[in-house]
Amino acid sequence: MAASERVRVLLVDDSIDFRVSLGLLLAATCDVVGTIDDGEGIENAVARLCPDVVVLDVSMPRVNGFDAAQQLLAVCPNAKIIFLTSHTDPAYQHRAYRIGARGFVLKARAATDLLPAIRVVNGNGTFFSEGG
C-alpha cells in the first residue's frame, strides 16, 4: 500500500493499553489519526480528524459504542464504522449491523481480522468476524 493509500483510522476504546496495542498493530499500513477513550464527542473528533474508518469499542463509560455510532451516523451517514468488542453474543453483531456498522471484529481476533476489516470497509464492503 503506497503512502497516499494509507487508511486514516480513528480508534475509540476506553482502555489506553488496548488503544496503544491497536496503534502498533495498524502502524505499518494505516495512519491512526487520533484516539479517544469514550463515545462522547465522537462527532467532533470525526469532523476534526477526518478518518476514513472509525474503530469503535462497544462497551465504554458515559456513551457506549452503539449510542456513539447512532449519533455519528445521524450527522455523517457515510461514516465507516467497525465495532471492535469482546462480546461474542450474536445479538451484538446483529445490533451493530442494524445500526449501520460496516464491520464487527472480536477483540480476540483483532490481530488477524482488524487489518482486513479496515481494508474491506474502507473499500465500501462489509466485514463481520466469525464467532460473534
Image: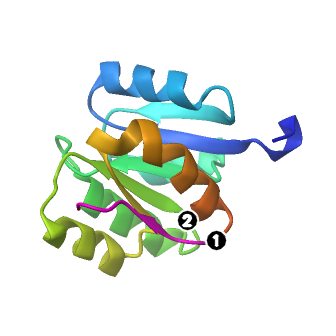
**Which residue is identified by label 2?**
79
Three-letter code, disc 2? Ala
- The residue positioned 37% from the left and 62% from the top of the image is 69
Task: Indicate yes or no whether the magenta region holds residue 128.
Answer: yes
Query: Toward the viewer: 77 or 2?
Result: 2
Residue 35 locus on image (x, y percent) = 47, 32
Residue 124 numbered tag: 1
Residue 43 locus on image (x, y percent) = 48, 54
- The residue positioned 87% from the left and 39% from the top of the image is 2
Residue 81 locus on image (x, y percent) = 47, 60
* Residue range (magenta): 125-131
Three-letter code, disc 1? Asn
The alpha-carbon separation of the residues under discs 1 and 2 comes to 10 Å
Residue 119 sits in which quadrant? Answer: bottom right
- The residue positioned 62% from the left and 26% from the top of the image is 27
Residue 14 sits in which quadrant? Answer: top left
User: Is residue 81 shown above or below 98?
Assistant: above
- The residue positioned 56% from the left and 51% from the top of the image is 116
